[in-house]
Amino acid sequence: MPKVLRLEPRLRVPAAIVAAAPMAAIAVTLLLCSALIVWAGAPVGRAYLLLFDGAFGSRFAITETLTRATPLIFTGLAAAVAFRAHFYNIGAEGQLYIGALAAVAIGGGAIPAPPAVLFPLMILAGMAAGALLLLVPALAKTRLGVDEVVTTLLLNFVALLFVSLMLDGPMKDPTALGWPQSMTLPSELEFGKLLERSRVHSGLILALVLALALWVVNDRTTFGYEMRAVGANAKAARFAGISVDAVMLETALLSGALAGLAGVGEVAGRAGYLTLDMSPGYGYSGIVIAMLAGLNPLGVVVAAVFVAGIIVGADSMSRAVGVPTYLADVIVAVSLLSMLVATMLVRYKVRWS
Amino acid sequence: MLELIAAAPFWIAVLRIATPLIFGTLGVLLCERAGVLNLGIEGIMVAGAFSGWLAVYYGAGLWTGVLVSACAGAAFGLLHGVLTVILALSQHVAGLGITLLATSLSYYAYRVNFPKVNSPPTITPFGETHLFDAVPGIGTALGAQTPLTLLALAVVPLIAYVLYRTPAGLALRMVGENPAAVEAQGISVTAVRIGAIAAGSALMGVAGAFLTLSAFNAFYFNMVNGRGWICVALVVFASWRPGKALLGAILFAAFDALQLRLQQSSAGVLPYQVYLMMPYLLSIVALALVARKAAYPQALMKPYRKGER
């Protein structure tokens, strides 16, 4: 028998080590990425200080980070909910855009109704649009056995092209010059600002409430239990009398609706209108955030603030010392991989035998 | 319509569009036949496109550039192998992580090398070989191709031969179907799987190299644009067989080329976005058509742990 590497579960894992694992992962990430900062010719310590300062060092920095974190909490929750049931929704980016498009379609002036009617309608439309977009791959999976990873990925491109089509045609703001842009939402339909002289909006409150609600659903309700059971072992769940297909579809609808809400929040809370560059990949970052959080809804909030901080901080650091802003994406990717490795090494020993 | 399809320029375009898909689909095929899903492909293609082009920009030969792309792909493949085979992490998440890492590293490196350029610096790419111009029929379409397209067409039978006619190929297929049986033969499942991922990822790197060293002459952001994901769909459509992978890539490229022609000839009839959606929708429809009878490698996405069943 040749020697092989194998994983042995650790019998007892001290709580301190479990708690230290994420810290160790972040430390390793910063260490690895400091090589990139050196390569760009900038002083490492100063670059990281500037990054932290740009993310959390002032009132402006903190409010910008929270504004950035809002859509990331929604997409992070969308991924966490789906991944827990082992339904790999990688299409949150497309669902976000379709949700935003639906919100603008309802609220952009096409429907003559009072704001009190339009506002809830706009939010529901965004959620429904995101959910419907994910229903297609979910049905394809449960009815035809089509792997959802590829279909949700490909639908991102379809969704973005569809938004582009609408912004070029029926939903284009005729008064906007240059880039295609949708009609602007009237101010009565915008999410209120939480703080003066900042861009933080009430979408953040909605995101926090939903994170709490999903945490309760996950841990305290039958539906939460069923989602976990389907994710852990679909065969056993079916044997236990759970309708796996129904749970899968419900999970998909929930996940798509959450991603759609991210889009509603961005148009109604931040921009006021829809453009094709509204999201710099919030849908994909949501997956990273969900994994960093160990799929825990409350952890998603922390992870979303962390990732938002990296993005916002890297922006201002880049301007000061000339390190490309793409460093933020590298840090996020490396922290995902090192977090995965850290959680694995906490639970298992790697042995050569 | 028929005239359009019968004409040589159409088939020249088809082979050109198919080339990165052939390399990429074969790359995915090697990984999945060994039992490992590699969603790193999208990012590995970006890294391949960037690294090969950068090498050539700094004075390396074109073939050295292709080699650099292959090595960059293999390096990310090794990382994927360590994460998914040795550490048995989720293949979905690790693959997406590799895509994010490879993409962001390439973009970062591009900006470190060219901080302030707006129009991307160019190189002199591969030219048409015109080796087959004298051959009647397909000669014109083949002759107008660059060497990388011919390489792609040659790699298909090579991979098929290795997979079905060599001990290494047998071991690769076995670790994707019944890893315990391979281990019982005294062969390391870990080594075979990691080797397969590295080789497959090298092909993905070359798929990227085609974009910057043949199809275009520069590196652009977002230039891979979902081609990697399409390869993941194509390999299901091809039921994990090299010959069918070639057929699938060419069929897909034919639809894409047709879509481009229609877009030009019937401008204004439909918005251009409708035509651009077609390749993605087509892939989804193709997946739905074959899903029921798709014969997935039995051990796909199942980490192998010695002694476990």
Image (spheres, coloured by chain):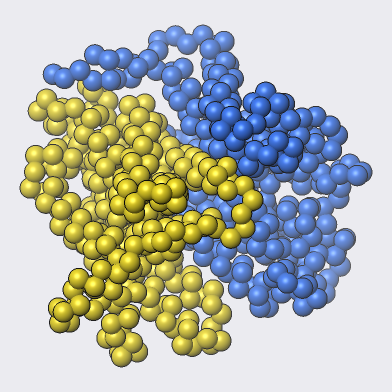
Q: Residue furthest front?
A: B59
Task: Give the position of the C terminus of chain A as an image quadrant.
Answer: top left
Horizontal side, residue A241 vs residue B188: left or right: right
In percent of the image, x 30 and y 69: which residue is there? B128
In percent of the image, x 55 and y 37: which residue is there? A330
In percent of the image, x 51 and y 65: which residue is there? A158
Q: Position of residue A256 (x, y in %)?
A: 58, 53
Number of numbered discs present? 0
Which residue occupies the foreground of this view, A65 or B135?
B135
Which residue occupies the foreground of this view, A101 or A276?
A276
Q: Is residue B247 visible?
A: yes
In percent of the image, x 28 and y 20: which residue is there? A5
Horizontal side, residue A267 vs residue A282: left or right: right
Q: Position of residue B151 (x, y in %)?
A: 23, 59
Q: Quadrant of residue B273?
A: bottom right
Please tell me the colour of chain B. Answer: yellow
Q: Quadrant of residue A286?
A: top right
Q: Position of residue B280 (x, y in %)?
A: 44, 65
Which residue occupies the foreground of this view, A279 or A108?
A279
Please tell me the colour of chain A. Answer: blue
Q: Is residue A312 visible?
A: no
Task: Give the position of the N terminus of chain A as an image quadrant.
Answer: top left
Q: Position of residue B245 (x, y in %)?
A: 25, 60
